[in-house]
Image (cartoon, rainbow, N blue to C red):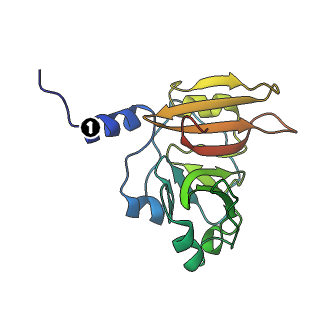
Amino acid sequence: MKRAPVWFLTAAAMSVAGVSVATDSAAAAGTAQPVAGPGPIAAVQVAETDHILSVFGAGPYRFGASLTRLTAAGLVYPTTVDPGGRAVATTAGDWDGELLLTFEHHRLIVIDTAAGSVRTLAGARVGMTFDEVDRLYCRLGTFVTDESGRQAYVVRVGPMALRFGDHPIRDGVGSITVGPAALV
């Protein structure tokens, strides 16, 4: 039996997981269309700028991107690297303050957001209920509870994962974290 190429399997897995496989330019331009979910989703107030977060990154913040290059381009605020090779930076420019970026050895490995103006390709945002996110991802995710009792909804896409964390004050999604499944 002939095996499908790896890129096909990855694209198919992302499609099944409700992650549109859009081109980088479509995602960066915000023209990628969300995957239609089963049933209506409650409206969430959106800022004027609609930024898209995927398992590839967000806008110019692609996984593996260099901290040095992003800083030189004015896309992150200057930060320091700890002795272990980790750094955390806040986005600047068009994405000012919307993302918290974690770098290891100067390479982007994890993206976090608590901004309602950022959405996933499937249309999930901070402020939605976990049931709404579960419907958008066709119930392919897993509900988890961490050691402190906080709930999250995790969708794995190959080696990457999207983690929708709860909000400390109200019900629903309070943050979205994307990165390697082992770290998220």
Q: Residue at x 49, y 47 (%)?
A: 121
Q: Residue at x 43, y 55 (%)?
A: 32
Q: Residue at x 61, y 65 (%)?
A: 49
Does 29 appear above or below 165? below
Of the 4 image quadrants, the one containing the C terminus is top right
Q: Residue at x 63, y 33 (%)?
A: 132
Q: Position of residue 29 (x, y in %)?
A: 46, 66
Query: Residue 130 lies in what quarter of the image?
Result: top right
| Residue where numbered disc 1 is placed | 6
Query: Residue 129 lies in what quarter of the image?
Result: top right
Query: Residue 97 lies in what quarter of the image?
Result: bottom right
Single out the residue that lies furthest toward the right.
169
Does 79 appear above or below 150? below
Q: Please, what is the three-letter code of the amino acid marked with disc 1?
A: Val
Does 20 appear above or below 51? above
9, 137: nearer the viewer: 9
